[in-house]
Image (cartoon, rainbow, N blue to C red):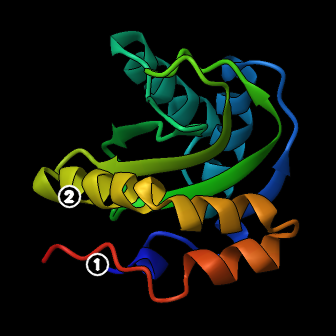
Amino acid sequence: MEICDLLSPESVVSTVRATSKKQALQELAAQAAKVSGQNERAIFDVLLERERLGTTGIGRGVAIPHGKLPELDRLYGVFAKLEQPVDFEAVDDQAVDMVFLLLAPESAGADHLKALARISRLFRDGEMCKKLRAANDDSSLCKLLLSGTAISAA
């Protein structure tokens, strides 16, 4: 699976206004509802439930909130840059300014975990993070994210 299978131009947002983790998750749930056709509240609830298990703030200003919904037919992603960094209770205590939300069908199993691992690797690339932070519009972000960056199962 390629990253372009997870993201579309409509699922990349260059400026999300949020002053808290909860508000950021609400904004992302709204965007995910638009691209996936799922209920916004159901998405928000599954994200909150996952955050209660432990933070999805992986460090270096990045969070990867994720969850599973029974009605989904495939994996969906939403990438957003936050206008102002927010406290995500990240593992390194740094505020988060980039978020990659991943939604998966309940039956996704290993595909969900493989996609999470690939997304995590993407954000361990310091150069890519620098470029993403420098991009200031949806189109530029989308081009960067879709520029051959694979999230393959291989």
Left or right of 113 on screen, residue 104: right
Which of 95/17 is in front?
95
For badge 2, the amino acid type reads Lys
Which of 92/146 is in front?
92
Left or right of 55 on screen, residue 36: right
Which of 90/70 is in front?
90
Q: Position of residue 70 (x, y in %)?
A: 30, 43
Name the quadrant containing residue 110. bottom left
Name which residue lies at 88% across and 37% down.
17
The residue beneath circle 2 is 114
Q: Position of residue 89 (x, y in %)?
A: 54, 14
Inter-mark Cα distance, 2 to 1: 10 Å
Name which residue lies at 42% across and 49% down.
103
For badge 1, the amino acid type reads Met
| SS category of the residue bearing label 2 | helix
> Which image quarter holds the N terminus?
bottom left
> Which image quarter holds the C terminus?
bottom left
The answer to whether the residue labelled 2 contacts the one labelled 1, judged by CB atoms less than 8 Å apart, is yes
> Within 10 Å of the Cα at label 2, are there few (<14), some (14-19), or many (20+) other Cα atoms?
some
Does residue 17 appear in the picture of this structure? yes
| SS category of the residue bearing label 1 | loop
Compared to residue 105, the image places residue 95 above or below, namely: above
Residue 1, disc: 1
Name which residue lies at 80% across and 79% down.
139
Left or right of 45 on screen, residue 1: left
Farthest-out residue, bottom: 148
